[in-house]
Image: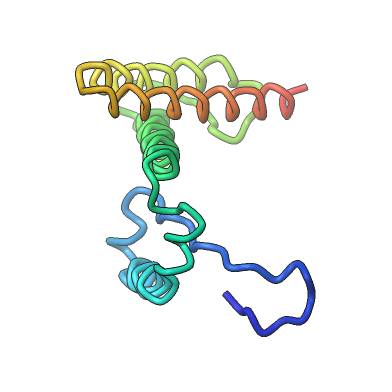
Amino acid sequence: ADLSSSTPAARVTTPAAPRSGEAALNPSVENERKEFLSRWKWLLSLLGYFGKESTDIRTGQALFRSCEDQSLRVASDSAFGLSIDWHDNKSFQSRQQLLMLHVWMVHRRLLSEDKRGKEVQETLFDTLWEDTTRRIRAAG
């Protein structure tokens, strides 16, 4: 992040966590993220980035992205006999069913965890709801 800008909108932003497998395909993405975190750790700590709630939110969002990626793989795998175009708004119901199945499996696993697992599960559900609402609006 460039802090040399004189505009009030200049701010420090954390690079997004890589999507499933992205870091394995492009190690520089993970290296850039680690470098950023080590460089700005003091500021991120001050802002609460490493706090329990913030960490739970990022974990829930990463789990949702993983479920979404896995649903996409299943939808595009001809072995399952599915022909779902992930980017076609008309296949909303089929896409949603696959996504819900994956989120439900992670949800059941998180419920077997301690209190922290339940809190991450709540964030996972919130992220699912936000994504579903966004896709419903996009479908019209």
Q: With 99 as the anchor, is 108 left or right in this view?
A: left
Q: What residue is rendered at 54% in x and 31% in y? A: 85
Q: Position of residue 75 (x, y in %)?
A: 41, 29
Q: What residue is rendered at 22% in x and 23% in y? A: 114
User: Quarter-wise, where is residue 41 in the image?
Assistant: bottom left
Task: Note whether 51 is above or below 2 in the view shown.
Answer: above
Viewer-proximal residue among 78 and 17: 17
Q: Position of residue 65 (x, y in %)?
A: 43, 39
Q: With 84 as the anchor, is 109 left or right in this view?
A: left
Q: Position of residue 3 (x, y in %)?
A: 63, 79
Task: Note whether 65 is above or below 127 in the view shown.
Answer: below
Viewer-proximal residue among 25 and 132: 132
Q: What residue is rendered at 46% in x and 22% in y? A: 125
Quadrant of the drawing holding the C terminus: top right
Asked whether residue 69 is in view, the answer is no
User: Quarter-wise, where is residue 116 in the image?
Assistant: top left
Quadrant of the drawing holding the N terminus: bottom right
Task: Note whether 139 is above or below 47 in the view shown.
Answer: above
